[in-house]
Image (tube, rainbow, N blue to C red):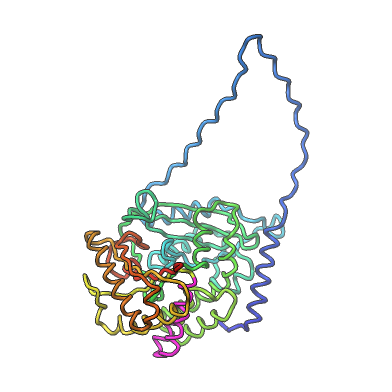
Amino acid sequence: MKPIARDGWRLLAFAFLAAALVGCTTPEPAKPATTPAQPQAPAAPAPGAASPQPAAPAPTAAPALPPIMPFNDAVLFAANNLFGKAELPPPVPPGQAQRYPLVIDPLVDGNSGFQSVATQTMEARIADLVKGRYPVFQLEPFTTTALARGPILFIGTFTAVDKDGRNVSERDWYRICLALVDLRSGKIVSKGFARAAMAGVDVTPTAVFRDAPAWAPDPATQGYVRTCQGTKVGDPINPVYWDRIIAAAMINDASMAYTAGRYEEALDLYKGVQRTPGGDQLRVYNGVYLAAARLGRQAEATQAFANLVDFGLAQNQLGVKFLFRPGSTLFVPDPKISGGYQMWLKQISDRAGRRTSCMTITGHTSRTGPEPLNERLSLLRAQYVKQQLDKDNPPLARRTTAAGAGSREPISGLGTDDARDALDRRVEFKVKGC
């Protein structure tokens, strides 16, 4: 994709947002006036009769959840509901057959914000469904050029939850949530929902998310998830997600270049996004670090990790994927895995030391093994990391404490002890008041 000057991106984003805001503020057309029928006067009650009391409204039963289905069946169930009941805008000009451009912003895990083999499989199945059954839609790539035309936007989340649909304990099923958004009006025009069984689902993160060293709450990703989850038809798109959607399309190009091993191209694209409005995103900082590290550009990688730490501490929460030996407080000795850890620790101590706030260093484990042992091990690992930071920056020691959460605060909660639940074994740095 040919790079566009920064001012060009600003003009594109401004024009896109202005058009969307016009759609949001357009008043509803007035309904024709009707003459209401005159109500009849109620008959007077008989002497001594008690006045009748209005009947209490019957409670509305919550709609029954769909059954838990095999993964492929659940994807098609949710997608057919989504496309079959979409409230699409009228064609222009009226009465003329129209094909609506449809772009897919890659689906994500609703807990971590990561893309995975499962979310990519969902996108492929949905694309095939659209081509074969819903010709009213014309699939287009997720690019800034396509977004500028105000297409229908497809988003979705795939989230492992417990039997009650919560993210607090063991995982029992996957929640599929899909949404269509009309980017001309900025409104949700359809929703789809299904429940998928756990068996046979590969939630291994895609390359850039698997390799990412850190995780933090990202307003852009949270805006994506919130647009899809807990909303209904007619609700507006989350404003933070909307404001950064053009950057999201550029990030997607960079991520594809990284996955394909084109690290020089990926680095240029990530750094280009970083310079644009909306480029202040976790995926950008992780991407710059990863691409620079792959190219052996240590100075750029170090600065990128420092920026990544600053981003996480600004969100008051930064999780770093330190990999320890099983049952130990020592890092895995493989230099391909832990070779950058000392630089990571130095940057964390340096950037945290520039702040005046205090910080809790919390160890986490996956849910395998007895919980009392998990809690003890997570505390020991947090204490080990704190010791490393104290050596690099002794004054910081007075403003940090160590804690162990065991497996009580999972992100994936899968208990697989591999790349799929690496975030559950993170060490987390939480900013707090002193």
Q: Is residue 6 above or below residue 108?
A: below
* The one of 161 and 367 positioned closer to us in this rendering: 367
Q: Looking at the picture, how far across and down is residue 138, in whole percent? A: 57, 64
Q: Quadrant location of the N terminus?
A: bottom right
Asked whether 309 falls inside the magenta stretch, the response is yes
Q: Is residue 4 above or below residue 34?
A: below
Q: Looking at the picture, how far across and down is residue 4, in whole percent? A: 61, 82
* The one of 332 and 236 positioned closer to us in this rendering: 332
Q: Looking at the picture, how far across and down is residue 125, in whole percent? A: 43, 62
Q: Looking at the picture, how far across and down is residue 295, in whole percent? A: 41, 89
Going 51% across and 85% down the picture, which residue do you hit? 268
Going 39% across and 68% down the picture, which residue do you hit? 116
Horizontally, is 39 left or right of 135 in the view?
right
Q: Is residue 125 above or below residue 166?
A: below
Q: Is residue 131 visible?
A: no
Magenta stretch, residue numbers: 289-314
* The one of 312 and 77 positioned closer to us in this rendering: 312
Q: Quadrant of residue 412?
A: bottom left
Horizontally, is 247 left or right of 89 in the view?
left
Going 70% across and 60% down the picture, which residue do you hit? 92
